[in-house]
Amino acid sequence: MISSFQHSMDQKFIETDILIIGAGPVGLFAVFEAGLLKMRCHLIDILSQPGGQLTEIYPKKPIYDIPGYPSILAGDLIDQLMKQIEPFKPGFTLGERAESVEKQADGRWKVITNKGRVHVAPVMFIAGGLGSFEPRKPPIDNIVSYEGKGVDYFVRNPETYRGKRIVIAGGGDSALDWTIYLANEVKSLTLIHRRTEFRGALDSVEKVRHLAASGKINLITNSQVVGLEGTDKLDNVLVRHDSEGPSKLEADYFLPLFGLTPKLGPIADWGLALERGAVEVNTLDYSTTVPGIFAVGDVNTYPGKLKLILCGFHEATLACQGAYNLVNPGKKLSFKYTTVTGIEGLSTQDSPS
Amino acid sequence: MIAVTVIDREGKKHEFEAPTDMGLNLMELCRINELPIKGTCGGMALCASCHVYVQSDHTLPEQSDSELDMLDQAFFVEPNSRLSCQIRLTDALNGLTVQLAPDDAEE
């Protein structure tokens, strides 16, 4: 499946019929319904794989309210959806966040990601679910001012840290894995964890304990990072031990690795009417207050809204009917059953009809 | 019905009468009553957005591995921290008092 993403990941400029923000179950199913109406789709998601929270948060949890499946694992549902939409050759921009939206002179939407990739389409579906999954930032007052100046929430390029003094905070797999990986590359590495026990994979915990025992890393437990210091860039990390009190560590980089948490993010700034962080829609076709932009799935709200995948599928189906008139001005849509017409796939992606 | 007290982030006390025959958990009780608790994952102990501090000394359901995992990654964690979605409301919890933990996803 992954190979079919590559094509679009190489392109800097992407044109399609419906641009879908969010590649969760509802965004994926929208591709199917759009495909039946011969509309092409391209999806943007901040996560590096499709599936949204189903693959990111609970891939192994069974879901019991998908019609036709007495029980299906969340991860399997995504695999099935990917198979179902395959004939319609959707494009994917993964690992990037849809940052800005503007209306072009020709009436189409232009969406630029945080990596500068440009997407143009007459219709946009916001299927952003809970929002984009962003790193959890520890509650340290001035942490934002050191972002890019010594504070990194992801390890993007391990080379950056070669020969430097690194402080990692966290007790999960990501903190442990990067501690093990970077231990031999850096000048010094301190791992700070709030408790004594680690909850990461046993094998990783043992490796980290071994690194600490042999003096390769400095392991500080029962402690939290409470402050950061430095004038132009990070110089010191302030640590507070539960019983021994505060101490100070010299550091070039501080990597707080506390997992991901969903945030509505830039969607909140796109000029759509919001109610308690959800996008208001008209249930006729799940259109938002901005013509040409629809919102489906957990991200929208309307009287009677239920945050169910089942309901999101319905919403996406009706939104495609609404989108048809915008993608194909003047054309009349005739409703067809798949039992009558079967599935007629689309050939190449990203060249609008 | 049991009495449950929830103290919000501004320190205001909210007293609720909660049914114990509906399989309701504490996170759901808070949400029904429109307290600012997100419950992002819907009660699977897979986020920490329903983090509370338990102030009364009731015997609570044991913490599952996934709850411990989540609290491990959360912030502002104290010895009396719990994920409220993992506390099913039963008759034994009459008089339960909890306080909402700070929202760590707030920007």
Image (spheres, coloured by chain):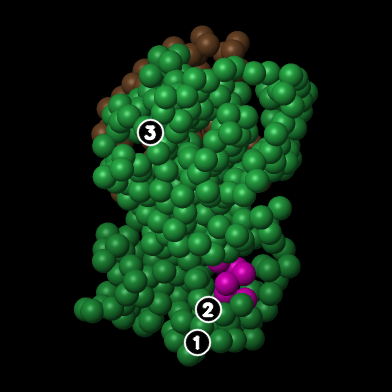
Front one among A242 and A27: A27
Quadrant of the rendered structure where residue A330 is?
top left
User: Which residues, given as a range, are shown in magenta?
Assistant: A175-180
Q: Which is more foreground, mark 2 or mark 3?
A: 3
Q: Colour of chain B?
A: brown
Q: Mark 2: few, some, or many residues within 10 Å (few <14, many ≥20)?
A: few
The disc, 1 or 3, on the residue closer to the chain's N-terminal end is 1
Q: Residue A162 carries which label?
A: 1
The residue wearing badge 3 is A293
Same chain shared by disc 1 and disc 2: yes
Q: Which is more foreground, mark 1 or mark 3?
A: 3
Say whether marks 1 and 3 touch (CB < 8 Å): no
- Does dot 2 land on a helix, a strand or a loop? helix
Quadrant of the rendered structure where residue B8 is?
top left
Chain letter for mark 3, please: A
Q: Which chain is green?
A: A
Q: Distance between the residues labelled 1 and 3?
A: 46 Å
Indicate yes or no whether the magenta region holds residue B26.
no
- Does dot 1 land on a helix, a strand or a loop? loop
Say whether marks 1 and 2 touch (CB < 8 Å): yes
The residue wearing badge 2 is A158
Q: Mark 1: few, some, or many residues within 10 Å (few <14, many ≥20)?
A: some
Three-letter code for the amino acid on which mark 2 is drawn:
Pro
Three-letter code for the amino acid on which mark 3 is drawn:
Ile
